[in-house]
Image: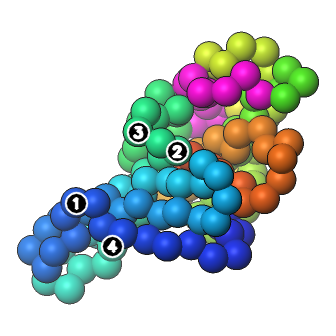
């Protein structure tokens, strides 16, 4: 999803055969290119269960304050947070809503102060009343190029 050419990963906590949760630190080449991925076993199945990413954070302090991981959202969704940088030319970054196939179904550019509260409208391909897994993503402004950072929160998208 991040299109990093290469990266190294190390387990920070959990991840054993009997654990339901784990935290993995992923580092790409280049300055400040590090994310922390929180994983949970699908349906808490510790007998060979599938690991599922539930949260991706940039650094130790989360940027996305709302919605929370695993929250149910409807359009428009209010996304709140605080970036650690002032951005470039007034642009802090971008919020995207991705569906279960990681297709961008709605997005908005964040401008102004590092603290933000922004409504993001999305269009789901589901029938009214349907729901699917999805992701709220914050892409900080990246004027220097190179590996793109992102903070992601897994959510349940309602149509």
Depth check, front residue: 126 or 85: 85
Q: Earlier in the sequence, mark 1 or mark 4?
A: 1
Q: Nearer the viewer, residue 58 or 97?
A: 58
Q: Establish if 125 lies above or below 64.
A: below
| Sequence-first disc among 1 and 2 | 1
Measured from the top left, where is residue 138 in percent x and y?
64, 41
Confirm whether residue 93 shows in the render.
yes
- The magenta-colored residue range is 74-87
Q: Is residue 131 visible?
A: no
Neighbour tally class for label 3: few under 14, some 14-19, many 20 plus, Cα within 10 Å: few
> Which residue carries the number 1 mark?
13
Q: CA distance from mark 3 to mark 1?
A: 14 Å
Residue placed under numbered mark 3 in the picture: 60
What's the distance in space between the residues labelled 3 and 4, CA to CA? Answer: 22 Å
Asked which secondary structure carries label 4, the reply is strand
Instruction: Report the coloring of the rendering.
Output: rainbow
Say whether marks 3 and 1 touch (CB < 8 Å).
no
Q: Is residue 114 above or below residue 121?
A: above
Q: Which residue is mark 4?
A: 51
Instruction: Residue at 60%, 65% (x, y): give it.
Output: 28
Query: Residue at coordinates 43% horizontally, 53% vertically from top-left?
Result: 36
Q: Position of residue 12 (x, y in %)?
A: 28, 60
Q: Is residue 95 left or right of residue 18?
A: right
Kindly report which numbered mark, 4 or 2, lies closer to the viewer in this rendering.
2
Q: Is residue 69 left or right of residue 28?
A: left
Element carrying mark 3:
loop
Instruction: Say the numbered circle drawn on residue 72.
Output: none
Instruction: Give the quadrant of residue 4.
Output: bottom right
Question: Could you give the CA–CA distance between mark 1 and mark 4, rounded to whole angstroms?
Answer: 14 Å
Q: Which residue is mark 2?
A: 58
């Amino acid at each position: 999803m991040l299109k990093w050419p290469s990266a190294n990963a190390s387990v920070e906590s959990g991840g054993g055969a009997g654990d339901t949760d784990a935290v993995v630190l992923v580092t790409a080449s280049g300055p400040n290119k590090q994310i922390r991925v929180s994983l949970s076993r699908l349906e808490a199945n510790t007998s060979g269960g599938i690991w599922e990413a539930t949260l991706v954070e940039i650094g130790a302090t989360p940027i996305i304050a709302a919605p929370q991981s695993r929250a149910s959202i409807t359009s428009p969704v209010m996304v709140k947070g605080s970036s650690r940088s002032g951005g470039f030319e007034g642009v802090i970054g971008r919020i995207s809503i991705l569906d279960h196939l990681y297709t961008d179904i709605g997005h908005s550019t964040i401008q102004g102060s590092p603290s933000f509260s922004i409504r993001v409208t999305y269009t789901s391909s589901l029938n009214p009343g349907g729901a699917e897994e999805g992701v709220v993503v914050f892409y900080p402004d990246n004027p220097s190029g190179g590996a793109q950072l992102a903070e992601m929160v897994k959510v349940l998208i309602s149509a």
